[in-house]
Amino acid sequence: MSRRASYLLPVALLVVAAPGRAGEFGTLKDEIAAARQALVTMVLHRDKRGPEQQKLVKDTADLVTSHLGKVKAPAEQAAAFKELKDTWSAFKATREKELVPAILEGDKAKYERIGAGIQKARLDRMYALLAQLDK
């Protein structure tokens, strides 16, 4: 198995094999979890901060963005879906512009502050919105 494939396999398994989730919004939750895990791996393992992991971090986030662009929320859930999309956009922008650079620079204080602060709040909000939308 190629090195790249060995990195993508766990992400694919998270997305495909997650038990107990139904529908588009359950799939989105799994994809967000995979994107988060790719970033957490980068934080926890200094040897996983190279180009391959950086690409995985970007690709998993881009998958969520792409999926969000294709999903149609029920009309009665339009406001919640818009909030989900807006929250994801802010979450992804912070990852790309602040969090990943701080990780790559080894600025632990900064990436811990961002990750445990605004990003955690956004992630919690997205999970709550996904649970609401999946009903």
Image (cartoon, grey):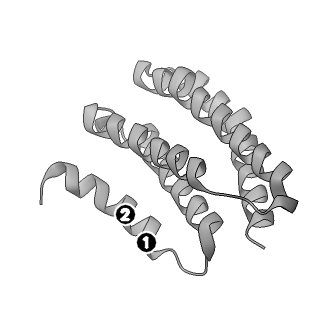
Q: Amino acid at mark 1?
A: Val
Residue 79, relative to residue 74: is it above or below?
above
Q: Which x, y percent locates residue 28?
A: 58, 59
Q: Amino acid at mark 2?
A: Ala
Residue 51, relative to residue 62: is it above or below?
above
Q: Quadrant of residue 99?
A: top right
Q: Label 1: state its secondary structure.
A: helix
Binning the other alpha carbons within 10 Å of mark 1 as few (below 14), some (14 to 19) or many (20 upward) gives few
Q: Which x, y percent locates residue 81?
A: 76, 51
Residue 76, relative to residue 100: is it above or below?
below
Of residue 40 and residue 46, the one placed in the foreground of this image is 40
Say which residue appears at 77% left-offset and 45% top-offset.
Answer: 82
Question: Which residue in the structure is indicated by mark 2?
Answer: 12
Q: Label 2: state its secondary structure.
A: helix
Q: Quadrant of the C terminus?
A: bottom right
Q: Quadrant of residue 59?
A: top left
Q: Which x, y percent locates residue 105?
A: 43, 18
Of residue 3 and residue 43, the one placed in the foreground of this image is 3
Q: Quadrant of residue 71?
A: bottom right
Horizontal side of 48 relative to 70 (left or right) equals left
Q: Are marks 1 and 2 in contact (CB under 8 Å)?
A: yes
Q: Which x, y percent locates residue 32?
A: 56, 53
Say which residue appears at 27% left-offset and 31% top-offset.
Answer: 51
Q: Which mark is residue 16?
A: 1
Q: Quadrant of the N terminus?
A: bottom left
Say which residue appears at 67% left-offset and 37% top-offset.
Answer: 119
Q: How many marks?
A: 2
